[in-house]
Image: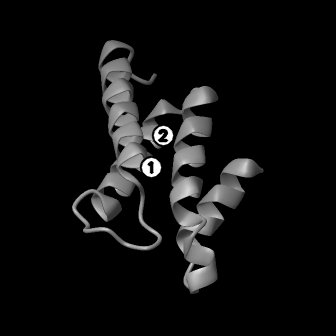
């Protein structure tokens, strides 16, 4: 249920009041997917996050440097894990 809710926030946030929840939703969604063993989906979320926010200048609702680093590290860890143990 939580996975669906996080995806909904990411996909449907448009109003200014909603945008503050998008970055945390990306972070929690990728973490949750990784925890339940859906590493390929977690990697896709991390990749999407970095494509959306990686090259942006500071934005009021954008990620902090720490959040960008966290997602970048997660992506590296997931890539390494998937190369070592590819999905069946």
In this rendered view, identify the residue nearer to me: 14 or 83.
14
Hey, which residue is sitting farthest right in the picture? 1
Percent position of residue 69, x then y: 34, 40
Tag of residue 17: none
* Residue drawn at point x = 73 percent, y = 50 percent: 2
Circle 1 SS class: helix
Hey, which residue is sitting farthest left in the picture? 55
Dot 1, how many residues are within 10 Å of its Cα: few (below 14), some (14-19), or many (20+)?
many
Tag 1 residue = 45
Percent position of residue 82, x then y: 36, 23
Is the C-beta separation of discs 2 and 1 under 8 Å? yes
Dot 2, how many residues are within 10 Å of its Cα: few (below 14), some (14-19), or many (20+)?
many
Is 1 displayed left or right of 23 in the figure? right
Q: Is the image coloured rainbow, by chain, by secondary structure, or in one colour?
A: one colour
Percent position of residue 1, x then y: 77, 50
Is 76 displayed left or right of 63 in the figure? left
Residue 68 vs 63, above or below: the answer is above
* Residue drawn at point x = 29 percent, y = 20 percent: 83
Circle 2 SS class: helix
In this rendered view, identify the residue nearer to me: 6 or 85.
6
Residue 41 vs 6, above or below: the answer is above
Tag 2 residue = 42
Percent position of residue 14, x then y: 55, 83
Q: Quadrant of residue 33?
A: top right
Residue 48 vs 82, above or below: the answer is below
């Amino acid at each position: 249920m939580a996975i669906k809710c996080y995806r909904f926030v990411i996909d449907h946030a448009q109003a200014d009041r909603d945008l503050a929840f998008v970055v945390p939703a990306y972070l929690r969604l990728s973490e949750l997917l990784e925890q339940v063993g859906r590493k390929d989906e977690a990697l896709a979320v991390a990749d999407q996050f970095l494509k959306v926010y990686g090259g942006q200048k500071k934005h009021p609702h954008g990620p902090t440097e720490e959040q960008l680093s966290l997602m970048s590290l997660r992506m590296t860890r997931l890539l390494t894990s998937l190369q070592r143990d590819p999905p069946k």
